[in-house]
Image (cartoon, grey):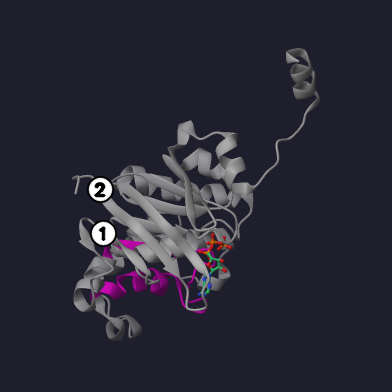
Amino acid sequence: MAENNLIEIKHVSKVYDNGVVGLKDINLTVKKGEFLVIVGLSGAGKSTLLRSINRLNDISSGDILINGVSIQKSSGKKLRVMRRDLAMIFQNFNLVKRASVKRNVLSGLVGYYGIFKSTFGLWKKSDIQEAVKSLQRVNLAEKFYDRADALSGGQQQRVAIARALMQKPKIMLADEPTASLDPATSSLVMDDLKSLNENLGITVVANLHNEQLALEYATRIVGLRGGKLVFDKEASLVTEKDFDQIYDRKKKITKKMVVSEEAQA
Ligand SMILES: Nc1ncnc2c1ncn2[C@@H]1O[C@H](COP(=O)(O)OP(=O)(O)OP(=O)(O)O)[C@@H](O)[C@H]1O
């Protein structure tokens, strides 16, 4: 394993129990510190791939290594310890809506405390201080005692990021983190992800529908289509043509193109 390879996806395929093929022979390496964005149409396999990385999905063949260790072959305590390095945020935020922000953020420690202590809120003072710090990172410290469902969608997503930070992850997996948000709020959430990537050195792997956001925030972009990897490029090298391949867009015929094609004829 090269020293900087944090996630190695090797010949990964996934066939669901009903026969639907989610992923076909995916090979992908994510290096420490990258901000990798996965783009593709609905059904392209983005969620399947992301959920395979922390083994919320089992894969059908191939292997996935985290820091050189197969998560696919790990179980029990070893798997639980590996998962501490892998935080995840979701399109629907997945907060306990009737609970306070404080409780939601502290629940990010469940991988360290276990379910019992988390359920009964048996937190150490130092953890409570850490929760405040996590919320400060997403500029929401003043919401500590509010109920989660009293916050806007964007604020809830940022609380979800603060919760994820509690587990001190090396990798942040973000499954369509802005899909439920308006453009301005989406940028705030993406800014938070960028900040933890740049300031805390957390590697980010995010699924996004929005190609503009992908181009703006990613260091590298991977395109999926029908479960297959179509392109894998540094963000600055990704072209309109790359996106056309995965979004099935026809070449737009503009007046200017007709004139220039006529001139060439
Ligand atoms: N639990 C499941 N059982 C059966 N098929 C599934 C399951 N989850 C996903 N699929 C199928 O696998 C394929 C890939 O789905 P996936 O959710 O990974 O795509 P996606 O790119 O994340 O799409 P979206 O953006 O809509 O979430 C699709 O054909 C989908 O219908």
Q: Residue at x 51, y 58 (%)?
A: 177
Asked if the magenta segment contains residue 94, the reply would be yes
Q: Residue at x 34, y 60 (%)?
A: 165
Mark 1 and mark 2 residues within 8 Å of each other at the beta carbon: yes
Give the magenta range: 84-112
Q: Judge whether residue 124 can be spotted in this image.
A: no
Residue 241 coordinates in the image, percent (x, y): 59, 36
Label 2's element? Answer: strand
Which image quarter: residue 114? bottom left
In the image, residue 84 sits, relative to residue 123, either above or below, namely: above
Residue 193 coordinates in the image, percent (x, y): 43, 50
Label 1's element? Answer: strand
Q: Residue at x 36, y 46 (%)?
A: 197
Residue at the top extreme, as displayed: 263
Mark 2: which amino acid? Asn
First in sequence: mark 1 vs mark 2 = 2
In the image, residue 246 sits, relative to residue 167, either above or below, namely: above
Q: Nearer the viewer, residue 145 or 111?
A: 111
- Write down the residue under mark 2: 5
- Write down the residue under mark 1: 65
Q: How many marks?
A: 2
Query: Image quadrant of ligand 1?
Result: bottom right
